[in-house]
Image: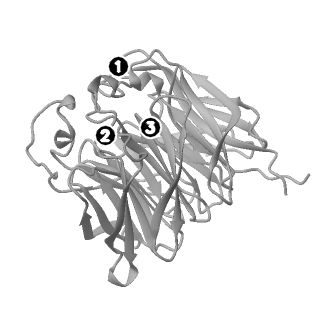
Amino acid sequence: MINRHYDFCVAAGQPSGRDATGGGKQWADSALYTCRLDSDGSSISIVSSAELPSSPPGYQALARTRAGKSVLYATSGEEVWSLSVSDENELAALGSAPTASGGASHLCTDPEARLLFTANYGSGSVSLLPIAEDGALGEAKVYAHGPGAHAGAEGTWGDGPQFRQESAHPHGVVVCSGQLYVADLGTNQVVCWTIDYDNNELQATSAITLHDLAGPRHIQFTSDGEVGFALNELDNTISVLRRDAAREGELSLVQTLSSLPEGWAEANTDPATFPNEVYSKPSHASELLLSPDDRFVYASNRGHDSIAVFSLDPSSQHLTPVQFEPTRGRIPWVFCLSADGRFVVVQNNHTRASEAGPDSVVVFQRDESTGLLNLAPARLEFPTVSSVWALPVRATHG
């Protein structure tokens, strides 16, 4: 079987205003683009598009429904969009469902596509939406998180990380062995909920509090569910966590290490060099992914503008940095791996650095034995990109 190409969905639009984060406040010509990457990484091009009636999504997740169809789910403000994925990876909007809470920053489904979950940053809650056999979303149930690590703090975006922890801010969700784990930047915790599939409900189980001002943003687990990795946005660190299945998935800390090169943050303390006016440090972590074989962890750094690569020692469950690869653009926000792990596609947000842009989609080829990234020639540019995600690999004989 030869993969003749790889398809990725790029969410993009034209900003007509700006918000406090430096992104688009209002959008025109929002669309999801199916972009095709040659199997050698030499070029990537747009092959189809699907227009959206609202702003382009901030995050996407691909699922295989119980009816056997591929559906792409995408966050868009206080809604989740459902899009069908054809055999040619063309996208078509199926509809949307409200999260019944504030705007969702992240989403995931369980492996059998029975439930969809969203992390609602602004409202400090998590939403659960049942998924029908054909992929349609049902009515949401909302579960609130508690007070923030610095509850009651007052200030504006420029006042530093304490203000972003004035209340709960769930930022990332992932399902692992029948439990939902939520990275909550505001409470400074990774929270564990047990999933009741019979009644479509969540039950609070446990939580681990990380070091002060960590700000957990995303969490991922190895395929066996034994080790988790929390990416901490506020101080650019990764917390390695051991998961105890015998204790209802309770987490314990194994290791904490920086996602930046040693000494870089200390050498770049001038606020004038920070990515934009809302950043309180020279760099903030963004996205976290694992290689398909669980041997390598990848994290993006906004400010240092890089993908950090770590190797995992399965015996000690410790990470070791092996590479800090520049993303060839400003503010890498979302990145994804092709299904087979051969390529890493990165979304750079020049516009969020208060630059004219354009934003870029940059491709790296991944060495599967060493985990190292090498820049590929393929590259696309858009006025503004909000997210990127891998579509199904269509393998053909050759």
- For image coordinates 33% across by 66% down, the residue present is 201
Q: For mark 2, what is the residue?
A: 266
Q: CA distance from mark 1 to mark 3?
A: 15 Å
Q: For mark 1, what is the residue?
A: 18
Q: CA distance from mark 3 to mark 2?
A: 31 Å
- Can you say whether 234 is above or below 45 in the image? below
Q: For mark 3, what is the residue?
A: 58
Judge whether residue 300 can be spotted in this image.
Answer: yes
Say how the picture is coloured. Answer: one colour
Q: Earlier in the sequence, mark 1 or mark 2?
A: 1
Residue 228's image quarter?
bottom left
Q: Nearer the viewer, mark 3 or mark 2?
A: 2
Q: Is residue 132 left or right of residue 212?
A: right
Dots 1, 3 in contact, CB < 8 A = no
Assign a secondary structure to mark 3: loop
x then y, percent, for residue 215: 28, 50
Assign a secondary structure to mark 2: loop
